[in-house]
Amino acid sequence: MGRVIGLMSGTSLDGIDVALIETDGETVTATRGHNGHLDPLGPTGYRAYAEEERALLRRALADARAANRHTDRPSCLAEAEELITRRHAEAVEEFLAANGLVPSDIDAVGFHGQTAVHKPGQGLTLQIGDGQALARRLGIPVVGQLRLADVRAGGEGAPLVPVFHRALAQAAGFTGGLGILNIGGVANVTLISAAGELLAFDTGPGNALLNDWMKERTGAEYDEDGATAARGRPDPAFLRWLLDHPYFARRPPKSLDRDWFSHKLAGFLSTEDGAATLTAFTVEAVARALAFASEPPRRWIVAGGGAKNAEMLRGLARCLSAEITVADAIGWSSSHLEAQAFAYLAARARRGLPLTFPGTTGVGAPLTGGETYLP
């Protein structure tokens, strides 16, 4: 077992999640936090972006549309990459100090970076963040570029977390069909059969459209607890039109870029009805994922920002007709599951173990990946 830190900056652009787990890249084990209490996996941390930092990242995502290779840094991408690297370094340093740790206590850091472009059909995935600079500053080996090998091999490059989801399910002793749903900027699902077989894909939009809508209409970063959506009503005709997108009929594995869908088309709706419609869009897209399941899950575990949205959870309970459990209720971290996953993936990459599989990204055979940067 080794101590590995995972880092995640998602498409919602809210901040950086930090998580420490103990793992050999196959199993996971509990660790003790700085308070001496036993944590389900390990201590976690968070560093929010300032509004001017989010504004730079939003500009960078727009500028990234001009990129043709994962090494391209058009317009303000180089500035954004320096910011991402620096803020991730600070987040790790603050985390180590808060938990009474020093760099020599950590075996590796799993560094996802910030996705700027993800177009696997064009052989392109671009995550900004300088892994080598981060390793030098921290004095810890860093594993980054975790999607690149899969995309080069013809895979979707996403989602990457299913193998970690399976390790968690095994550690929890779950049997039977299980669905693990992460609702970040984009929503992705891992379907685990009773035999342990994996099927995973992006179901559709997660929080990104709703967050953008709330920011534009109210200045808020998100719809807290789904309160705005709860006051509105979904527009049936517009919702049907959104769900008519060809993506939902494609067989998985499949993945999405954050900007495949736009909230701008809902501009004719009131703030409340727009929030209700975009929330329903996320929920209905998840429900459509069941069409590809060999066995409908008897239980769903929900993580990510969407796990904090009561209106979204109510919609899922209606549409999925199954037991819905928020990850935190079973000792998993709704907020830090992806950061923990990138720690786990870094450990697997260091051992040359597969990160992606035919049933998760469509790659031809189980494939390892990641690039290791030494201090």
Image (cartoon, rainbow, N blue to C red):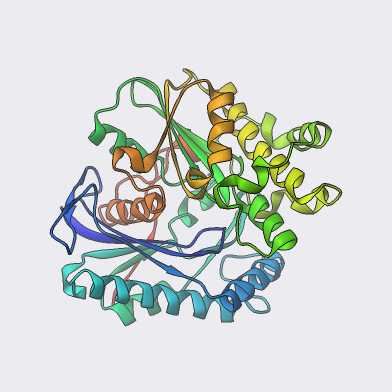
| Residue shown at the point (33%, 82%) measured from the top left | 137
Is residue 163 among the parts visible in the rendering? no
Residue 99 found in image quarter: bottom left
Residue closer to the observer: 203 or 108:
203
The residue positioned farthest toward the front in the image shown: 231
Is 6 drawn above or below residue 39 in the view shown?
below
| Residue shown at the point (69%, 37%) measured from the top left | 247
| Residue shown at the point (62%, 76%) measured from the top left | 56
Where in the figure is residue 343, as x and y percent of width and height?
32, 56
Residue 32 found in image quarter: bottom left
How many numbered circles are shown?
0
Where in the figure is residue 293, as x and y percent of width and height?
51, 22
Residue 162 found in image quarter: top left
Left or right, 2 with reference to 327:
left
Left or right, 354 with reference to 219:
left
Is residue 253 among the parts visible in the rendering? yes
The residue positioned farthest toward the left in the image shown: 36
Is 170 drawn above or below residue 95 in the view shown?
above
The residue positioned farthest toward the top in the image shown: 295
Where in the figure is residue 100, as x and y percent of width and height?
17, 72
Is 128 drawn above or below residue 208 in the view shown?
below
Where in the figure is residue 66, as x and y percent of width and height?
71, 68
Residue closer to the observer: 315 or 83:
315
Question: Image quadrant for the C terminus?
Answer: bottom left
Is 225 drawn above or below residue 70 in the view shown?
above
Left or right, 171 with reference to 324:
left
